[in-house]
Image: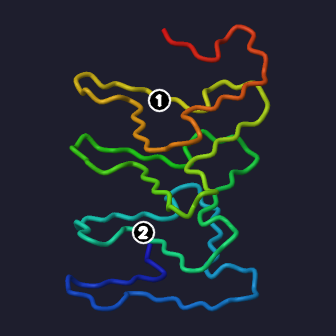
């Protein structure tokens, strides 16, 4: 079918944005964009970047004000799902960038790079799983380089009663 809105730009040196939305909402509680989609096929966004981005990012989020809410928030429904919330797939090419790179600022002394909290219940999958298939490389799967002088490396506080499993199992 026909597109409802189509923005097109020919190959050129663009010196301004194709689309700009300026919003100065200070007391309202509604979003600038509200997308309500009930479709079951086609997806919501489809980004096909065929140009080589030299210095720009495909998606760039910069904040200048303090905020107390989440910058990106994903909440699942109460129905069971089988897909991944975030799925990163590297092609069979010699990539040199990281899949996820977290750089903690020196003043972010109360922030944590990763927090995983599981609920009480019968787990059928590990909270963290690493499947390593390195066959010829000489680098470690986990590499910790630290100049820390306090705090220790691992702090394991285990209060549950292990019936047949081990706290650490190396085979």
Q: Provide the secondary structure element on which disc 2 rests.
A: loop
Q: Is residue 86 above or below residue 109?
A: above
Residue found 70% across the figure and 41% down from its top: 117
Badge 1 local density, few (<14 within 10 Å), some, or many (20+)?
Answer: few
Q: How is the image coloured?
A: rainbow
Question: Which residue is nearer to you in this view: 140 or 145?
Answer: 145
Q: Position of residue 32 (x, y in %)?
A: 63, 82
Give the total number of marks visible in the rendering: 2
Instruction: Kindly give the residue lying farthest to the front in the view shown.
Output: 149
Q: Provide the secondary structure element on which disc 1 rests.
A: loop
| Horizontal relation, residue 105 to residue 47: left or right | right
Q: Position of residue 21 (x, y in %)?
A: 52, 88
Badge 2 local density, few (<14 within 10 Å), some, or many (20+)?
Answer: few
Q: Position of residue 34 (x, y in %)?
A: 64, 76
Residue found 48% across the figure and 81% down from its top: 4
Marks 2 and 1 close (CB-CB < 8 Å):
no
| Horizontal relation, residue 39 to residue 145: left or right | right
| Horizontal relation, residue 49 to residue 107: left or right | left
The image quarter in which residue 75 lies? bottom right
The image quarter in which residue 18 lies? bottom left
Residue under label 1: 130
Question: Which residue is nearer to you in this view: 43 or 104?
Answer: 104
* Mark 2 or mark 1, earlier in chain: 2
Q: Is residue 54 above or below residue 156?
A: below
* Numbered label attached to residue 61: none
Where's the N terminus, which quadrant?
A: bottom left
Q: Position of residue 66 (x, y in %)?
A: 63, 76
Q: CA distance from mark 2 to mark 1?
A: 28 Å
* Numbered label attached to residue 59: 2
């Amino acid at each position: 079918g026909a597109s409802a809105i189509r923005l097109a730009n020919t190959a050129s040196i663009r010196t301004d944005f194709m689309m700009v939305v300026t919003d100065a909402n200070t007391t309202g509680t509604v979003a600038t964009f509200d997308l309500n989609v009930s479709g079951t096929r086609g997806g919501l966004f489809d980004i096909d970047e065929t140009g080589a981005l030299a210095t720009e990012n495909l998606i760039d989020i910069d904040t200048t004000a303090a905020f107390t809410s989440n910058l990106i928030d994903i909440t699942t429904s109460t129905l069971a799902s089988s897909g991944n919330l975030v799925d990163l797939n590297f092609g069979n090419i010699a990539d040199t960038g990281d899949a996820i790179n977290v750089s903690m600022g020196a003043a972010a002394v109360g922030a944590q790079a990763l927090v995983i909290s599981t609920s009480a219940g019968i787990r059928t999958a590990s909270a963290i799983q690493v499947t390593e298939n390195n066959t010829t490389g000489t680098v470690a799967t986990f590499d910790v380089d630290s100049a820390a002088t306090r705090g220790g490396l691992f702090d394991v506080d285990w209060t549950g009663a292990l019936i047949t499993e081990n706290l650490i199992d190396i085979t």
